[in-house]
Structure formats: C-alpha cells, structure tokens
Image (cartoon, rainbow, N blue to C red):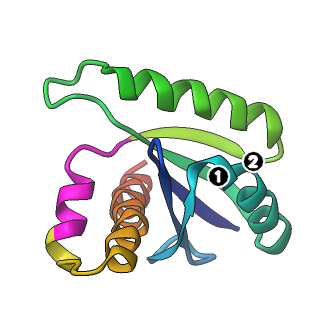
Amino acid sequence: MKILALDIGDSWTGIAISDALGITTRPYTTVASPDLDKELARIIDEEPIKTIVVGHPKTMKGTKSDQTLKVEAHMKELENKFPSVSWVLWDERLSSKHAARLTRPKTKEKKLETHAVAAALFLMSYLDSLKFQ
C-alpha cells in the first residue's frame, strides 16, 4: 500500500507518493486546488493508497494561522469524501522553502513543480517517523 502527501494551497496543491514499501517518495503532480477532489478520486482508483498525509501549515511558533484553519477544514471535507483511506496532518514548516532551494525554479511550470517536491519532502519526514514507532 502507498502513502500520498498533499501540500494544499489556496491556488495549487502539490501531490507526492511513496513506494509500496514506504521507503521512498517522489513528487507526483501539482493540480489546481479546486480540481483536487477529482484528482484524488482518480489516484485512489489507480493506486493502492492506504494513507493520505496532509501538510499542516503551522506558524514557526507552532500556532495556527488562517491558512492552518483553511487546510484543516479542507482535510475534513476530503476525509468525508474519501473515507476508505486514513488521514494524517503532518508538520510542513519550511518544506516549500526547502523545495524552492532544491529546484531553483525559473519558469512557471517549474515553480508549480515545487509544490509536489514540498509534499515529497514532508512525506519523507512522515515515513521516517514511522520507522521509529
């Protein structure tokens, strides 16, 4: 079974996926956030997804921002639409900045890819945490 990660933003959502053993991650795609439901339905239909990890955008102090509340509300909606998978909120602080440093995007298309790279980065962090449980 694979694990999916979502870096949900107001305009774009980056999606990353793990391998079946939960060892590696890779950027999967970036979709317009309004199209996320349709894309998730397609991915869940095509891939054996057991868990979806949603990036939790807390502030650097660990408090909630307006964006944190938006992501939490969106995740609840997605949980109701896709009850066959388990849902996890995961700290995503600095993942977007790290992804931008890694990819150094110069075009709009490359900049969009950084959302999926950010999702892959915090998905790797999540997978690493599972090894110590």
Q: Residue 8: where, in percent of width, then height? A: 48, 46
In which quadrant is the N terminus drawn?
Answer: bottom right
Quarter of the view holding residue 119? bottom left
Badge 2 density bin: few <14, some 14–19, many ≥20, Cα 10 Å? some
Circle 1 SS class: strand
Q: Amino acid at mark 2?
A: Val
Judge the density around disc 1: few (<14), some (14-19), many (≥20) Cα neighbours within 10 Å. Answer: some
Residue 90: x and y in percent read: 41, 41
Q: Position of residue 71 (x, y in %)?
A: 49, 32
Quarter location, residue 75: top right
Q: Nearer the viewer, residue 23 or 44?
A: 44
Residue at the extreme front? 108
* Predominant secondary structure, magenta span: helix
* 90 w.r.t. 3: above or below: above
Q: Residue at x 33, y 64 (%)?
A: 121
At 57% from the left and 78% from the top, the residue drawn is 19
Distance CA(mark 1)–CA(mark 2): 5 Å
Magenta highlight on residue 123: no
Q: Are marks 1 and 2 in contact (CB under 8 Å)?
A: yes
Q: Residue at x 36, y 20 (%)?
A: 66
Q: Circle 2 is placed at which residue position? A: 85
Left or right: where 87 falls relative to 8: right
The image's mark for residue 88 is none
55 left or right of 34 in image:
left
Q: Please indicate whether residue 127 sits to the left or right of residue 58 in the image.
A: right
- Residue 48 image position (x, y, % from top left): 77, 69
Where does label 1 land, which residue? 51
Looking at the rendered structure, the kind of residue marked 1 is: Thr
**Residue segment shown in magenta:** 91-100
First-in-chain label (1 vs 2): 1
